[in-house]
């Protein structure tokens, strides 16, 4: 469960509580029994709270807009995590090379 601050259609800030599940790409090669279709990302809005902490009633259009914004946020967060992981692995590789050279 995650939460993010977003705006309503009226410009009011709310806290959207949601679950995000990253999808999986299709596997289309290999034995037929090992193939499967793509599974899309899933976003489930669990609740919305207004600035006063009380439940906020929202429209279908707001939900669709928020899901798009949450998707963009989750993708950018995943890309940043991947860059951080790549930086860490590169630094670790360089450190190992230095250690091997010093021996």
Image (cartoon, helix red, strand yellow):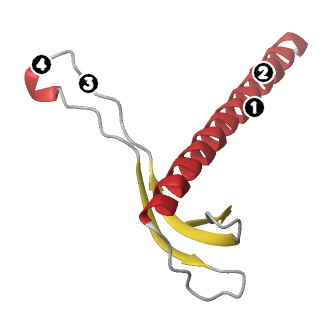
Could you tell me if the residues under marks 2 and 1 are in contact, i.e. CB atoms within 8 Å? Answer: no
Q: Nearer the viewer, mark 3 or mark 4?
A: 3
Quarter occupied by the C terminus: top right
Residue under pointer 4: 31
| Helix, strand or loop at mark 4 | loop
Q: Which residue does the image show at 52% across and 62% down from the upper left?
A: 62
Q: Which residue does the image show at 57% across and 52% down from the upper left?
A: 70
* Quadrant of residue 35 within the rendered picture: top left
Could you tell me if the residues under marks 4 and 1 are in contact, i.e. CB atoms within 8 Å? Answer: no
| Image position, residue 19 (x, y; %) | 47, 62
* Quadrant of residue 39 within the rendered picture: top left
For the residues marked 2 and 3, what is the alpha-carbon distance in whole angstroms?
Answer: 36 Å
User: Residue pushed farthest right?
Assistant: 102
| Image position, residue 32 (x, y; %) | 9, 22
User: In the figure, is residue 22 to the left or right of 35?
Assistant: right
Q: Residues within 10 Å of mark 4 (few under 14, many from 20)?
A: few
Residue under pointer 1: 88
Q: Which mark is residue 27?
A: 3
User: Residue pushed farthest front?
Assistant: 10
For the residues marked 3 and 4, what is the alpha-carbon distance in whole angstroms?
Answer: 10 Å
Sooner in the amino-acid sequence: mark 4 or mark 1 = 4
Q: Is residue 21 above or below residue 3?
A: above
Q: Residues within 10 Å of mark 2 (few under 14, many from 20)?
A: few
Q: Which residue does the image show at 76% across and 27% down from the upper left?
A: 87
Please tell me which residue lies in front, 40 or 10. 10
Residue under pointer 2: 96
| Image position, residue 71 (x, y; %) | 53, 46
Sooner in the amino-acid sequence: mark 2 or mark 3 = 3
| Image position, residue 12 (x, y; %) | 70, 71
Sooner in the amino-acid sequence: mark 2 or mark 1 = 1
Q: Which residue does the image show at 90% across and 14% down from the upper left?
A: 102
| Helix, strand or loop at mark 3 | loop
């Amino acid at each position: 469960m995650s939460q993010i601050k977003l705006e309503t259609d009226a410009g009011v800030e709310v806290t959207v509580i949601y679950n995000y599940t990253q999808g999986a790409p299709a596997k289309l090669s290999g034995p037929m029994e090992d193939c499967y279709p793509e599974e899309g990302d899933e976003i489930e809005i669990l609740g919305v709270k207004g600035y006063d902490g009380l439940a906020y009633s929202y429209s279908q259009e707001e939900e669709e807009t928020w899901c798009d914004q949450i998707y963009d946020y989750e993708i950018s967060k995943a890309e940043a995590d991947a860059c951080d992981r790549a930086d860490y692995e590169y630094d670790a590789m360089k450190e190992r090379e230095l250690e091997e050279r010093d021996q």
